[in-house]
Image (spheres, rainbow, N blue to C red):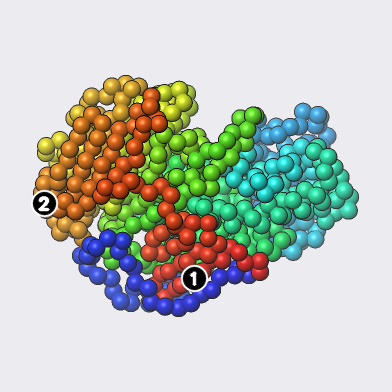
Amino acid sequence: MRNYRALFTLVLIAAAFPLQADSPPSPDRFADHEKMVAATHAAALKKREESLHKTIAKDTVWPSGVWGENLWCLSALYLNEKTARANELLLKRAQDFLASDQTHLAKTSPEDPGKLPWTFFSITDYVRILCLFHAKSPHFSGRLTAATEAAMKESLWLWVRGESRLADVSQDSLFVLLGTENHDLNRRPPCYLITALLSEDPSYRDRKLNDGRSVAEHAAAYTLFFREWPRQRAQTGLWIEVGSNTYQKYSWPALFNLHELSPDPVIRNRFGLLLDLACIEEAQISVRGRRGGGLSRADDSANSFASYKNLLFARDGQAAASSHSRVIETSRYQAPAAAVMLDKMAFPAAAPFAIRNRVLGKQVSRGKDGEAQAIDPDSALVNYACRSPHYLLGSTLQNPALTYTGISRQKRWCGLLFDHPAAKAVGSIGIVIEKTGAGRPQHSFWSVQHQNVLLIQRIGDHKEKGAYSTGTISMSFAVPGLQISETGGWILAHNGKAFAAVKFLDGGHRWDMEHKVASPTDFRGKADTGRILLHAGDITTHGTFARFCESILRNKLEVSADTVTYRFDEGKQRIEMFRYDVAEPGAFRLPLINGQPVNLHPSTTYDSPFLKSDFRSDRIHVNLGPVRQVLDFASTR
């Protein structure tokens, strides 16, 4: 069982700055929350079962080939239907592999997965099949035939023999990635679960891997490593690929496997806590299931992970299914009460509040092979969001002169989500980065945010400290029913309840043919360092859109070649942003918030009305309505 205290108290949603809501929340907002949570859990299990039945309804599953076969076989064996066919498919793939020439077998990658009975990203599902259904499994023993189990074991042994190295799971490697974050989570967790399983088999236990150490020695080292890994991530900020459109779906299944399949109770408990923390963090910064705030390896298009999340939150009218995995569908894990309440009961909030969470990303070193990279646990990155009853404005606070790993600074996104209950979809106003090179845009811009104001600067191209594959940086206005007007260089927009003001500060702007994307008119090519200001508001803070526009035009905005100074909230708030010059990174000055440098090393790791903890603390406090919890990662129970 996961070890956290649940105390009952009334904790009202607090505002991080003194603004009043247009209509205070009902005092019984969280009435019957236990029924809501129970109903959500029941609906989530039903949606998972429906997804599994859809999977096995046809003989083939997307993705095609061995990947889809593994998803189909996991689904069928979990439902205990069509098990003979599942065993037949698994046995043939494994026997064909064992009969082939394995002298070429080396470390796999998504680009070169080899001819294994799985693909790089389906290893997590394949290992789950063996762990759930082998003859001595504590879960669903015996659904694999003896021949299938033996062939799967031998295939996985051949893979792990060359893939796993004890040097990669020392306590000094807890912040070292083997490739990208999602690649790492498709390497070390499967290696652990395979060696742990094989160490219980006398015919495998003493076999030597390519590094000269035994299966049992590897299993013991991985156990120590994965006891500590969730503690360290919880203490320092969880993710590097934050809110990625593409890669969240490859990372999260590993967490479920470690929570449910590890033979070690400490690992199971701590990964359960990590899932709880991740669900709560995801829910507080999401608008009707769509994540906001600063994102990495992302853009403002639809996030395929949203349907994965809905296998936990069961939001009405939204898809609930996975595409590239069936791990969540075959899991009994349930989102904690606080996450469900944040998703379904807590918003619209009573008043605007801030979320300030550390995230990981600063690079310490990179291995000689160009793959392994060490991350600084004190990464000088803060995921900042201002959430009001009608919008969420978010970004990543950063120092552009520092060296962040490519997966942290790749395709960063920031912007504004509009929450209008009458709209069918959550709209956004946010950046659009023109891709100009072979790879994804890197280090394209940096930003600073204070409350409901965001400033962005494009970073000029440079061999080491500058942007890559980056053309113009534009602003997309993708909000249903958005009304747009312009005055004095400002683009003023609203949807009735949420408001936005956008201004390109180094010249004017031009619209695309559909009048949806505004781009700078004076783009200066690779050396461009143009700046953009985005100021959000709503009926909570300004009463009407007309008053919001009046306040924008009254605010004092000073723009020079090297500095932007913006005063707002009747002059009580001030942001000063200094231009980052890639040719002189050492001369960069952090922006000032009311005269003080922005704090990229806060004393907290999580700081919102709902999640709070000190930096490097094991104890994370969850506060929401009648629920107060402490997620204690030091627990060994």
Q: Distance from label 2 to label 1 (Cα)?
A: 43 Å
Total marks placed = 2
Q: Nearer the viewer, residue 339 or 353?
A: 353
Q: Position of residue 599 (x, y in %)?
A: 38, 49
Q: Is residue 90 left or right of residue 528?
A: right
Q: Above or below — where is 58 with respect to 11? A: above
Q: Position of residue 35 (x, y in %)?
A: 45, 75
Q: Is residue 589 left or right of residue 138?
A: left
Q: Is residue 567 left or right of residue 580?
A: left
Q: Residue at x 30, y 38 (%)?
A: 456
Query: Which mark is drawn over residue 186?
Result: none
Q: Nearer the viewer, residue 417 or 181?
A: 181
Query: Which mark is drawn over residue 629?
Result: 1
Q: Above or below — where is 96 with respect to 354? A: above
Mark nearer the viewer, 2 or 1 = 1
User: Disc 2 marks which residue?
Assistant: 546
Q: Residue at x 67, y 63 (%)?
A: 266
